[in-house]
Amino acid sequence: MEACQKLKEEYDACFNDWFGQKFLRGDSNDSVCAQLLKVYKDCVEKSMKENHIELKEVDLNYLGTDKEQKVPPKKS
């Protein structure tokens, strides 16, 4: 989701400031970063749709099942 990288960095910076300057001092109101989170989340969701990635697929555990995609063996 390279298209969303700048938005992620902006949200991360806001969150880190809020966490260090407010939350750790007892202020649990996290609304200061809410708009940045919304814009970032919308970007990620749009990018996922464009790349045909379903959110439900992200939550599925394929390891050790028949659905696990394995790297094909190298040809000699």
Image (spheres, rainbow, N blue to C red):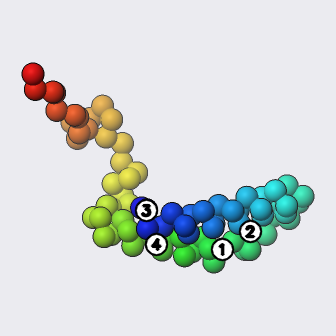
Three-letter amino acid code at disc 2? Asp
Q: Quadrant of residue 3?
A: bottom left
Mark nearer the N terminus (3 vs 1) = 3
Which residue bears the numbered disc 4? 43
Asked whether the beta carbons under mark 2 and mark 1 sit within 8 Å of each other, the answer is yes
Sequence-first disc among 1 and 4: 1
Q: Mark 1 vs mark 4: give the one in front.
A: 4
Write down the residue under mark 2: 30
The reply, left or right, for residue 42 in relation to residue 26 is: left
Label 4, residues with CA under 10 Å away: few <14, some 14-19, many ≥20: some
Q: Residue at x 36, y 42 (%)?
A: 61
Disc number placed over residue 2 in the picture, else none: 3
Q: CA distance from mark 3 to mark 1?
A: 21 Å
Choose top left, top right, bottom left or bottom right for residue 33: bottom right
**Which residue is at a point 36% across and 58% down the rendered structure image?**
56
Amino acid marked by disc 1 = Ala
Q: In which quadrant is the N terminus drawn? A: bottom left
Q: Kindly check if marks 3 and 1 are in contact, taking CB atoms under 8 A apart as contact.
A: no
| Distance from the alpha carbon under mark 2 to that under mark 1 | 7 Å
Report the side of 67 relative to 31 (left or right).
Answer: left
Q: Is residue 74 left or right of residue 25?
A: left
Q: Is residue 28 above or below residue 62?
A: below
> What is the three-letter code of the residue carrying label 4?
Cys
Determine the residue positioned at 51% across, 69% down: 41
CB-based contact (under 8 Å), mark 3 and mark 4? no
- From mark 1 to mark 4, how far is it between C-alphas? 14 Å
Q: Earlier in the sequence, mark 3 or mark 2?
A: 3
Amino acid type of the residue that numbered disc 3 sits on in the rendered structure: Glu
Q: What number is the disc on residue 34?
A: 1
Q: Is 26 situated above or below 66?
A: below
Please say if the residues under marks 3 and 2 sit with CB atoms less than 8 Å apart.
no
Neighbours of disc 3 within 10 Å: few (<14), some (14-19), many (20+): few
